[in-house]
Every structure is written in C-alpha cells, then in structure tokens.
Image (spheres, coloured by chain):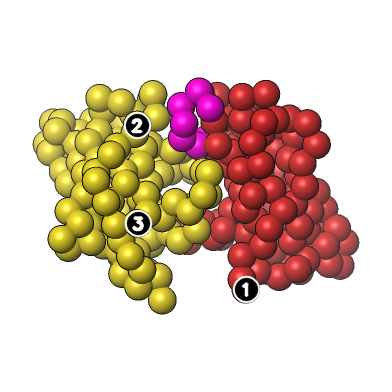
Amino acid sequence: EVQLVQSGAEVKKPGESLKISCKGSGYSFTNYWIGWVRQMPGKGLEWMGIIYAGDSDTRYSPSFQGQVTISADKSISTAYLQWSSLKASDTAMYYCARRSVGSTFDYWGQGTLVTVSS
Amino acid sequence: QSALTQPASVSGSPGQSITISCTGTSSDVGVYNYVSWYQQHPGKAPKLMIYDVSNRPSGVSNRFSGSKSGNTASLTISGLQAEDEADYYCSSYASSTTLGVFGGGTKLTVL
C-alpha cells in the first residue's frame, strides 16, 4: 500500500526556521516525483514545487522560488520542505503528494499544519 | 502562472447530475490531456478522482466522469449523493512552468 506520512503540526515564531518531512512507503521512492502543495486557511490548493527522489532534480513554481527549499533523502525515502525565516503568511496546511504523470498527484500525505505567530 | 477558473459553488439535489467547469488557456488545459480532478472533504487531504481528463483511479465510483473541449475541462457527477458534498479542484500541466496549476476550487452542496 502506497503511503505518504508527514511530520506533525508545528507552531513557530516569525523569523524562525523550519523543516517538515514526508516519508514514502509501499512503492519505489526513487522512481517518482514528490510535490508540495500549500493550502492557506479557507483557501484553495497551490503548487509549490516538486523533487525527483532519484536524483533530487527540483522545480519550483514561480511564486515559491526563493521562498522555500525542497529536498529529499532517498536513503530514508523522505522528502522535505523547509523555510529559513518564517513569516506569518506562511501559516497554512502543507501537503506532500506523489506525482504520477503530467501534473497528477495520485497519493497524498495527511498534511502538516504550520502556524506562524508571535 | 494564473490559476484555472472554476465556479465558486454548484449545488444539486440527491440523484441529480451536476457539472463543474475548469477553464484554462492554450498553454495548459487546451494543449495537454493532463487534467486531473480532486475531491476534498473538510479537514481531509485531497483525493484524486479523475486523471488524464477522463480516467478514474481504481476505487472511484463510475458516477464521476471527466471530459475536455478546447480550453475547458469538466467534471460531471451523476446520481448525486450526500457524501459527494465537498470541495473539488481541477489541475492541469502547464507548459510555462513545466509544473502544474490548480483551479480555485468549487464547493459542491447537495441540497
């Protein structure tokens, strides 16, 4: 069974750094892209970027380029999303998802809620 | 990359059929058959319902169907049931970014 299990909810202050994780299982982790999707409170889904777990080739949506860093450790089948300096506007639910073909995400993690507040 | 355009809300009675539209451009929906649809219940992760315009993943009810004409894709749900009440998002591959783009989402209310 394909599963993506994300790290738990985080509460941070503005300016702090953060790295959240997404561990894949039940499939060949290195043969797929993993994407990250943001959902701000009460809002829609937004593509952030994707990483190919096999060689860490990474692509970012223009709105998120330079704002976050996506990485992966194939030895432990885990992808990451990190911030160096959080802002209140980063408060959102973040989902990881496995990309199949085109832009399709066929399996999703349960989401990680990030709250940034002073 | 601008989001795809979906109606904010649609509604229907149990047993009826509804259609949700998703309008893009000649750089995404219009040129690629990589349109997918997701269902999201409150507090839950999105779930893939349709991929590659009209294909259903294993386990998804055949009451859900997808189609595309020009720059507009559509999701049709027939025989509406109470459990279909959710938010629905379309997505397409976009050549401008080589990534994807989502629609703004449509809230389906089953009356």
Per the rendering, the colour in which chain B appears is red
Residue B3 is one of the magenta-drawn residues = no
- Numbered disc 3: what chain? A
- Numbered disc 2: what chain? A
Q: Residue drawn at (34%, 34%), measured in percent from left and top?
A: A59
Residue A15 appears in which quarter of the rendering?
top left
In the figure, is residue B106 to the left or right of A18?
right
Instruction: Please provide the residue range marked out in magenta.
Output: B95-101
* Residue A2, percent from left and from top: 40, 70
Q: Dividing the image into 4 quarters, which one contains the C terminus of chain B?
A: bottom right
Q: Residues within 10 Å of mark 1 (few under 14, many from 20)?
A: few
In the figure, is residue A104 to the left or right of B16?
left
* Residue A26, percent from left and from top: 35, 73
Q: Residue drawn at (37%, 49%), measured in percent from left and top?
A: A33
Which three-letter amino acid code belongs to the residue tagged 2? Tyr
The reply to the same-chain question for discs 1 and 2 is no
Given residues A106 and A20, the one toward you in this image is A106
Relative to A33, say whether A6 is above or below: below
Relative to A102, say whether B76 is above or below: below
The CA span between labels 1 and 3 is 24 Å
The residue carrying mark 3 is: A31
The residue carrying mark 2 is: A60
Which three-letter amino acid code belongs to the residue tagged 3? Asn
Q: Residues within 10 Å of mark 3 (few under 14, many from 20)?
A: few
- Numbered disc 1: what chain? B
The CA span between labels 1 and 2 is 32 Å
Per the rendering, the colour in which chain A appears is yellow
- Secondary-structure class at tag 3: helix
The CA span between labels 2 and 3 is 19 Å
Q: Are marks 2 and 3 in contact (CB under 8 Å)?
A: no
Which three-letter amino acid code belongs to the residue tagged 1? Gly
* Residue A36, percent from left and from top: 36, 45
